[in-house]
Amino acid sequence: MRVLKIAELPENPMNAATPVPGWSGGEVSRTRQAIIGEADSDNFRCNVVNFRQGATTGWHTHDCDQILVVTAGRGSAGERHWHGATADTPMSHITVTTAGSQSKH
């Protein structure tokens, strides 16, 4: 068993994402904290993704099931979806996906 504290996980910058057209939330800025990293499991990846106030991922789909656990702020999801913070609050979520899966923008 591993016991992790989110506040103690290293916060690494993520690459830029395409803003949602018409979204005026601001620059896309987010970080990732690995819970189960790419090489840590044959089956899963698990990360905390932190969105700066107003930041989004841009529209995308996944080629596997995805579990999202919102840990702070408010967000949204759907089939073809985007993740992100509202214009006036930051947002964080934990994401669990299949190891090796891809998102398509």
Image (cartoon, rainbow, N blue to C red):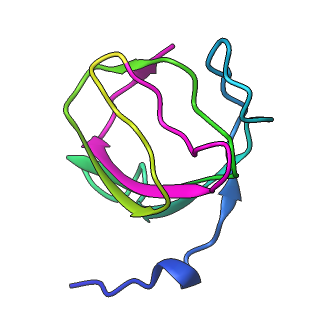
Question: Total label count?
Answer: 0
For the point 39% across and 24% down, which residue is it?
102
Quadrant where the N terminus is found in the figure: bottom left
Direction from residue 42 to residue 56 in the image, left or right: right
Q: Nearer the viewer, residue 24 or 42?
A: 24
For the point 35% across and 55% down, which residue is it?
46
Q: Reply above or below: 43 against 57.
A: below
Q: Reply above or below: 49 against 98.
A: below
User: On the image, which quarter does residue 101 sit in?
Assistant: top left
Instruction: List x then y, in percent, for residue 59.
Output: 50, 17
Report the predominant secondary structure element of the magenta stretch.
loop
Instruction: List x then y, in percent, for residue 62.
Output: 33, 23
Direction from residue 13 to residue 56 in the image, left or right: left
Whether 9 is among the magenta residues is: no
Instruction: List x then y, in percent, for residue 95.
Output: 36, 50
Whether residue 102 is visible, yes or no, is yes
Find the magenta span and give its range.
81-105
Q: Nearer the viewer, residue 29 or 41?
A: 29
User: On the image, which quarter does residue 98 sit in?
Assistant: top left
Residue lying farthest to the front in this orientation:
88
Q: Nearer the viewer, residue 69 or 101?
A: 69
Q: Nearer the viewer, residue 38 or 63?
A: 63
Direction from residue 25 to residue 75 in the image, left or right: left
Q: Reply above or below: 10 against 25.
A: below
User: On the image, which quarter does residue 63 sit in?
Assistant: top left
